[in-house]
Image: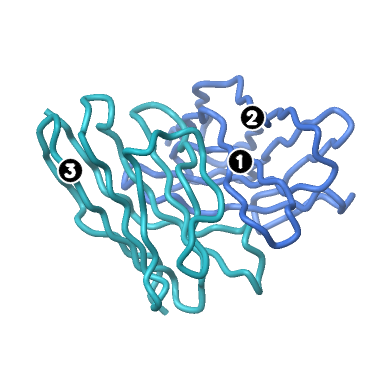
Chain colours: A blue, B cyan
Amino acid sequence: AQTVTQSQPEMSVQEAETVTLSCTYDTSESNYYLFWYKQPPSRQMILVIRQEAYKQQNATENRFSVNFQKAAKSFSLKISDSQLGDTAMYFCAFCPDSGGGADGLTFGKGTHLIIQP
Amino acid sequence: DAGVTQSPTHLIKTRGQQVTLRCSPKSGHDTVSWYQQALGQGPQFIFQYYEEEERQRGNFPDRFSGHQFPNYSSELNVNALLLGDSALYLCASSSRDQGVETQYFGPGTRLLVL
């Protein structure tokens, strides 16, 4: 079984600042995927970014980037030039690579990010 | 391109009743997963369906059951409802060809058990 830990229940930054959300995980799997999802107050869970564990290069999607440290089992999300619309719950999630078999996601408890104007 | 849809959006039931929630996957997706999200928590995996069969199950009792239809849509059934079943139920879809691990979520069904 795997666990995902998000140690920051809530964070608040000013608009245009850079913010980093932390995530650590524990697993005995060697191949897996990591994700960050955003859940605004509207509650629709939106995929922000995806990282394959076998890739050393950190994933980037526009203003969102990750710092993936496999040995440390750490997967942080950096949001640059934060915008008011970034206000949401952010969930880190883990999925083992079962070679195309069934894969359920394991989520952390989330970090509530508030962008202040 | 329609995303994942779920119905109903809200539902109120009483203890002991049964409920059925519905999900239509994103176009081109063949796999459906269900999650339960209690207030203030992250989603918890219930089960995943592919080719009309349950492929993997999380730590949920047999009161939780599901079904997948030939058009890939899915239902989640919960029998003998308990107060603790009150939660947001999320459906996610993915594709075996494109990577079953990358799941796209619907807006959820908010279930309240009184």
- Compared to B102, does B97 lie above or below? below
- Disc 3: which residue: B18
The mark closer to the camera, 1 or 3, is 3
Q: Position of residue A11 (x, y in %)?
A: 52, 25
Q: What is the total number of numbered labels drawn onto the structure image?
A: 3
In this image, A55 relative to B9: left or right? right
Identify the secondary structure beneath mark 2. Answer: strand
Q: Disc 1 marks which amino acid?
A: Ala
Cα separation, mark 1 vs mark 3, equals 30 Å
Q: Label 3 is placed on what type of residue?
A: Gln
Task: Say whether residue B57 is left or right of residue A40.
Answer: right
Observer-nearest residue: A11 or B75? B75
Left or right: A50 in relation to B10: right
Q: Which residue is mark 2?
A: A4
Residue that numbered label 1 is attached to:
A93
In the rendering, which numbered label is found on residue A60? none
In the displayed structure, A47 sits above or below B37; it is below
Task: Tell me whether the residue at label 1 lies in contact with that at label 3, contact meaning CB atoms closer than 8 angstroms.
Answer: no
Type of amino acid under label 2: Val
Q: Which residue is rendered at x = 71% and y = 35% of the image?
A: A76
Which label's residue is closer to the chain start, 1 or 2?
2
Q: Identify the image quadrant of the N terminus of chain A.
A: top right
Above/below status of B79 relative to B1 = above
Asked whether disc 1 touches disc 2, contact meaning CB atoms under 8 Å apart, the reply is yes
Q: Chain of mark 1?
A: A
Instruction: Give the x, y percent position of residue B88.
Output: 31, 40
The chain holding disc 2 is: A
**Residue A23 position within the rendered picture, expressed as x and y whole percent measured from the top left:** 67, 30
